[in-house]
Image: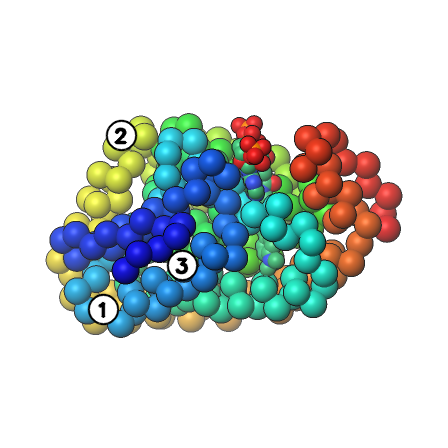
């Protein structure tokens, strides 16, 4: 099947998904999210697929977040609906999948991009990768599960630091705090993902699926995505959101007014 913003290939029981909007640093717009939802659904239905690798086109970015130019005009209701749809059809659908997804992070993984990587079961990054949740710079909070998944992966203290400072961290730091499984060179990135899936492919698929289901059931028990969606969508009604997005588009520092 042909996609506008994805390259999708099946080889040796592994599905390779490349987000292919290199000029926009592979930012997730609505078309890309819809296409991802379609592919993720097919992964569950296709017995030939035993594992998935998600990466970004080029050597600069995995995904530099949701598409800021697109969501600049959203209001509370639209933001809320899109957050719910995105959570259900893409981010939670990956996390709850019966096959292992590996994020091969080949550069910037920011905002919705890091949230996509965190929805995957395993994360490997190239040494040049930079990771962060810069939403508060835009007057927003993470809206695709980031407040919950980052906390689960790195603990509350580091998650609060990363989300409230909006600071980016290096791949080395990401590995140190448990956000990444491995850091490798750009050349080694896909090989490392294939090596891990190569082992998983030889194991009993039903047992792998049962293990994933059991681990995820525990994670879901301690996650509150509803509060995140409420907090995220309420930000769309603030002047600080409009200012944060305008400042990004005008390439200047934002001036927040707490309104
Ligand atoms: N969206 C749209 N375009 C983006 C983009 C993004 N997230 N990131 C980069 N680009 C575009 C830039 O605008 C630029 O386009 P042109 O100006 O050439 O047209 C091009 O990609 C190259 O970027 P730069 O020129 O900025 O490249 P630099 O090397 O100078 O900087 C950078 C790289 C990654 C540090 C910088 O591009 C950057 O700060 N990007 C934005 C990072 C960011 O704040 N990401 C968004 C986080 S917030 C939602 C649910 C969730 C979310 C939103 C809505 N709903 C349910 C509605 C999530 C929000 C986020 O992800």
Left or right: 31 with respect to 74? Answer: left
Q: Which residue is mark 1?
A: 46
Name the element at disc 1: loop
Q: Earlier in the sequence, mark 1 or mark 3?
A: 3
Please name which of the two marks, 2 or 3, marks the residue nearer to the observer: 3
191 shown above or below 53 = above
Name the element at disc 2: loop
Marks 1 and 2 in Cβ contact (< 8 Å): no
Residue drawn at x 31%, y 28% is 185
- For marks 1 and 3, give the CA distance: 15 Å
Q: Earlier in the sequence, mark 2 or mark 3?
A: 3
Residue drawn at x 39%, y 52% is 4
210 shown above or below 248 = below
Instruction: Write down which quadrant ligand 1 falls in.
Output: top right
Seen from the viewer's position, the closer of residues 164 and 45 is: 45
Q: Earlier in the sequence, mark 1 or mark 2?
A: 1
Provide residue 188's location: percent of width, then percent of height: 25, 32
Mark 1 crowd level (few <14, some 14–19, many ≥20, 10 Å Cα): few
Mark 3 crowd level (few <14, some 14–19, many ≥20, 10 Å Cα): many
Residue drawn at x 71%, y 33% is 250
Seen from the viewer's position, the closer of residues 222 and 250 is: 250
Left or right: 217 with respect to 100? Answer: right
Please name which of the two marks, 1 or 2, marks the residue nearer to the observer: 1
**The label number, if any, that marks residue 187 in the structure image:** 2
Name the element at disc 3: helix
Residue 114 seen: no
Q: Which residue is mark 3?
A: 36
Provide residue 46's location: percent of width, then percent of height: 23, 69
**Which picture quadrant has residue 218?**
bottom left
Mark 2 crowd level (few <14, some 14–19, many ≥20, 10 Å Cα): few
- For marks 1 and 2, give the CA distance: 29 Å
Does label 1 point to a residue whose CB lies under 8 Å from ligand 1? no
């Amino acid at each position: 099947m042909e996609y506008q913003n994805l390259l999708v290939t099946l080889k040796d029981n592994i599905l390779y998904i490349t987000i292919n909007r290199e000029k926009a640093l592979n930012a997730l717009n609505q078309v890309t999210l819809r296409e991802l939802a379609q592919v993720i659904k097919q992964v569950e239905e296709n017995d030939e697929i035993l594992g998935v690798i998600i990466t970004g086109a080029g050597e600069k970015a995995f995904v530099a977040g949701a598409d800021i130019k697109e969501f600049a005009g959203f209001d509370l209701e639209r933001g809320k609906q899109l957050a719910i749809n995105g959570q259900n059809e893409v981010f939670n659908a990956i996390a709850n999948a019966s096959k292992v997804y590996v994020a091969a992070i080949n550069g910037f993984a920011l905002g919705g991009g890091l949230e996509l990587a965190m929805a995957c079961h395993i994360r490997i990054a190239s040494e040049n990768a930079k990771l962060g949740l810069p939403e508060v710079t835009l007057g927003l909070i993470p809206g695709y599960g980031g407040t919950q998944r980052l906390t689960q992966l790195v603990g509350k203290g580091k998650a609060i630091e990363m989300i409230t400072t909006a600071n980016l961290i290096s791949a080395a730091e990401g590995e140190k705090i448990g956000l990444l499984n491995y850091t490798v060179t750009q050349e080694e990135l896909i090989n490392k993902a294939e090596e891990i899936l190569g082992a998983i492919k030889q194991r009993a698929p039903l047992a792998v699926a049962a293990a994933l289901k059991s681990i995820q059931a525990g994670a879901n028990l301690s996650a509150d995505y509803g509060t995140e969606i409420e907090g995220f969508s309420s930000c769309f009604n603030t002047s600080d959101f409009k200012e944060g997005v305008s400042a990004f588009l005008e390439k200047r520092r934002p001036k927040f007014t707490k309104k």
